[in-house]
Structures are given as C-alpha cells and as structure tokens.
C-alpha cells in the first residue's frame, strides 16, 4: 500500500510550494503530483460551507483512502515518497492522524516571520478576489468570528502563525529526530545549503539540488472600482462553482483571475503601528519558538531590517486584532 515516507507539514505561505517543487527534482524522491491533498485534515468528507470559495475548495480535498494512495502509484520502488500539506502543522488532530497511520514518518517544517506570513496569507486571498476586507489588521480582527462560522483554516491569519504551541504539540506526538525545522529566510538566502540539510535529514544524496524555484508568489492588487466589481464576480462564481467538478471552475475562473491580477503592484509595507500590534500578539509564542529551536529570532521582533522596534505596551490600537 503506497503511502508517504515524509511530509512537508507547514507553514502556509512560508515556501512550502517552492520546497515541494525543489524536492520533486531529486531522483531519490517522489513528491505527490497533487501538492496539497489535505488527506489528514479530516476523517471523512471535508467540511462544507464556510467563507468565500471554501465550498469549491473543499471539493478538491483528497479524502478517500484509495484516491490518496493512488497519488503514489507511480513512485519508483527506490524512491522515498512525500507530500506537502502546510495546514497539517497548525491542526493538532491532523498530526495525531499522521502518527496513527505512519508513526515512523519524517516531518519537515518551514517557519516564516509570523507577521510577514499572516500578511502574505491575507494578500493571497485578497489578490484572488476572495477576501472582502481591504484592510489587513481589520481582517485579522474577524478571525474569531470566521472560525466560529466554520471558515476554512487558510483564513486563520493569526492562529496559523502560532508556531511555538504547534511545535510543542508536534514534539509531544513525534520524536524530535523525526522532525526537521528550517527557516523560510534560509531557504530564500541559501537554498543549496538548506536543501542539502533537508536531504541529509531524509537520508538521500546531497549536492543535487541548488535552488528552490519560485512558486505560488503573487502580487498585490490595489482596490479600485473595477477590481471591487471583479472581486464580487469572482466570489459569486466561486459559490456557483461549488456545484461543479473542481476542474471546471478552475478553468472557468482563469480569465477572471487574469483580469483581476493583470497589473499586480508591490505589496505596501505594513504601517509601523500595525506591525507593532502584531508583534505584540505573537511575542510570547516567538519566545516558545526560540526555546524549542534554539534560534535567535530578534529579526521577527523588529519593524524593518537595520532598525529596531520594541513594542510599547501603553500603545492603544484603534483596531483590535481579536474582538
């Protein structure tokens, strides 16, 4: 029965797509042709409803065992099999399901500055026309209500970046020897060495992978009368597409996506006050990440490279992250 030997389990918007593509080039590795099957996110059919586009997205989940195993049918007998679903890391039940099915599996984690990760997550859904709130911090403030309403995990901009508690749970289930944690910054700045470290962890030949090809990188789409109209059309189409086979809506949506994203812009830098609020939110969890990894994460606590920033506890935000 073909099943994975290893997983790239997170975090979303932290280079998992690039890592999946890079590992797929290694002759001793076989990566699932579907990058995010999401199999271990549920015990049966995926949840229905939720936020914009969720009903359509859930139809793409590979949740039947036979369909999941079929992803690895073409793997050569000598190759290690792997799949990448970055939402596994932030889902405690998914980690338990993986352990029950494959207690000897090896797990790869990529962590990115949680503020940058959250902002990229929001920008991704905004550029896709699904996010309805054009202000990032305001959208973060809706997270609890959206979760209560059953919106999909990818809408959890803040919760997904609480890596410290996620690592603690992961290490309570799997031994540390089965887990390899890397930084997104290392994958970007020194991909060859970072990929060699991953290969050593997996026990395959090093020196064969020199770069992580850019994947799943989108631009920022500014709000305007035309883009607001396109977003509304896209959300309506996604809702209607939930009643069709996933590939039908994917193909039909391409012209709309092209029109919405045809003039991408550089993503605006977060306002200093917004970043301060987010750093404050993540601060205690960053402490845990440092304790669990031994990393010095002072760069996760500053506003801009070369500058320093200490969160002012007396600062009163005009928009709350959690309401």
Image (cartoon, rainbow, N blue to C red):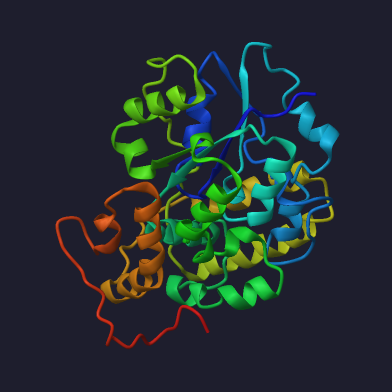
Position of 275 with respect to 118 (left or right) is left
Residue for point 72% across, 67% down? 50
Which residue ends up furthest to the left in the rendered image? 306
**Residue 310, position as x, y percentages in the image:** 22, 72
**Which percent across, then down, holds residue 266?**
34, 55
| Left or right placement of residue 49 versus residue 78 in this view | right
Image quadrant containing the N terminus: top right
- Left or right: residue 51 versus residue 213 is right
Q: Quadrant of residue 313?
A: bottom left
- When asked about the image quadrant of residue 46, the answer is bottom right
- Would you place residue 47 above or below residue 312 in this image? above
Between 136 and 132, the one nearer to me in the picture: 136
Residue 244 or residue 224, whichever sits in front: 244
In front: 258, or 70?
A: 70
Point out residue 105 in the picture as x, y percentages from the top left corner.
Answer: 62, 33
Quarter-of-image position of residue 265 = bottom left
Which residue is rendered at x = 80% and y = 61% of the image? 48
Q: Is residue 252 visible?
A: no
- The residue shown at (74%, 48%) is 249
Residue 310 visible? The answer is yes
Residue drawn where x is 52% and y is 29% of the image? 21
Q: Position of residue 278 (x, y in %)?
A: 37, 71
Number of marks in the rendered image = 0
């Amino acid at each position: 029965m073909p099943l994975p030997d290893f997983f790239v389990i997170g975090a979303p918007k932290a280079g998992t797509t690039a890592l999946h593509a890079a590992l797929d080039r290694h002759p001793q590795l076989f990566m699932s042709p579907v990058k995010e099957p999401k199999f271990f996110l549920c015990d049966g059919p995926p949840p229905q409803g939720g936020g914009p586009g969720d009903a359509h997205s859930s139809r793409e989940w590979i949740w039947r065992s036979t369909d999941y195993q079929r992803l690895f049918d073409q793997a050569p007998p000598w190759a290690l099999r792997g799949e990448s679903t970055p939402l596994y890391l932030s889902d405690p039940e998914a980690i338990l399901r993986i352990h029950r099915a494959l207690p000897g599996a090896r797990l790869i984690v990529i962590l990115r500055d949680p503020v940058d990760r959250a902002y990229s997550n929001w920008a991704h859904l905004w550029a896709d026309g699904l996010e309805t709130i054009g202000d990032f911090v305001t959208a973060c403030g809706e997270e609890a209500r959206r979760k209560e309403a059953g919106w999909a995990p990818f809408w959890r901009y803040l919760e997904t970046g609480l890596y410290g508690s996620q690592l603690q749970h992961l290490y309570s289930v799997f031994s540390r020897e089965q887990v390899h944690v890397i930084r997104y910054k290392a994958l970007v700045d020194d991909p060859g060495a970072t990929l060699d470290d991953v290969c050593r962890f997996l026990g395959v030949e090093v020196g064969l992978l020199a770069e992580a090809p850019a994947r799943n990188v989108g631009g920022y789409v500014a709000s305007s009368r035309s883009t607001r109209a396109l977003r509304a059309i896209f959300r309506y189409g996604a809702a209607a597409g939930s009643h069709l086979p996933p590939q039908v809506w994917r193909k039909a949506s391409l012209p709309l996506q092209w029109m919405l994203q045809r003039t991408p812009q550089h993503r605006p830098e977060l306002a200093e006050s917004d970043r301060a609020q987010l750093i404050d939110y993540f601060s205690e969890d960053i402490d845990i990440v440092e304790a669990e990894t031994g990393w010095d994460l002072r760069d996760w606590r500053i506003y801009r490279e070369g500058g320093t920033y200490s969160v002012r506890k007396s600062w009163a935000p005009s928009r709350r992250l959690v309401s």
